[in-house]
Amino acid sequence: MKTLRWPARLSYAVLALTGLAAGWSQPGLAETTSAEPVFTMRPVGWVRKVDGKSFIEIDKRYQPALLGLEKLTSLQVLYWFDRNDSPEKRAILQVHPRGDPEQALRGVFATRSPLRPNLIAVSEVRVLAVRDNVIEIDAIDAFADTPVLDLKP
């Protein structure tokens, strides 16, 4: 069994290239080691936005997994912050909430910051309809074409 290990030391070398340029000031940064396990994930679908409506389009091969979903009123959508995926942004561990330097620094696990070691996001949405492999939802805090990792009731 592989054991997850915490980074041995913090690195502040990429400060100017990451958080400050993105509006986040004085972030704490982490360094990774090559001994850490790597996990591979593939999207099960994509966020779609058309004419002011939001949808989750599930890959056809996963359509059987939608059985019974039409009976749910809400759904948790786990998705990937793909537009923040860089080693520098993943290394940021502390941010000022909402990028406001007047607010005290917090660890990213205590915020909803899109800057995270693993770029997994979660939003709860209301299910409006399910048609074939497409779920119509009320809204989602994700960009169009964001990869969806999983759905939870």
Image (spheres, rainbow, N blue to C red):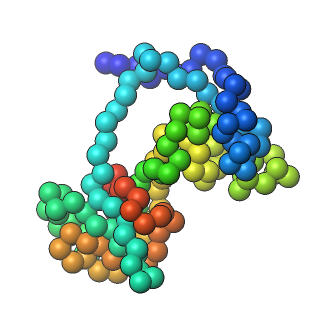
Q: Quadrant of the N terminus?
A: top left
Answer with the quarter of the image where residue 66 lies.
Answer: bottom left
Q: Name the spot of residue 128 as percent of width and height, x first.
A: 34, 81
The residue at the point 85 percent across, 52 percent down is: 102
Q: Is residue 149 left or right of residue 108?
A: left
Q: Is residue 126 visible?
A: no
The C terminus sits in image quarter: bottom left
Task: Judge whether 139 appears above or below 102 on screen.
Answer: below
Give the residue displayed 33% in from the left and 54% down from the top: 150
In the foreground, 56 or 88: 88
> Residue at 37% of width from left, 28% of height from top?
38
Residue 53 placement (x, y as % from top left)? 41, 80
Considering every residue shown, the one lying at the far bottom of the view is 51
Asked whether the viewer can see residue 32, the reply is: yes
Residue at image point 29% right, 80% down: 129
Residue at the far right in the pictured view: 102
21 vs 46: above or below: above
Front-most of residues 123 and 72:
123
Q: Position of residue 139 (x, y in %)?
A: 46, 74
Looking at the rendered structure, the number of numbered marks drawn on it comes to 0
Where residue 127 sits, quadrant-wise, is bottom left
- Residue 4 in the image: x percent, y percent? 44, 23
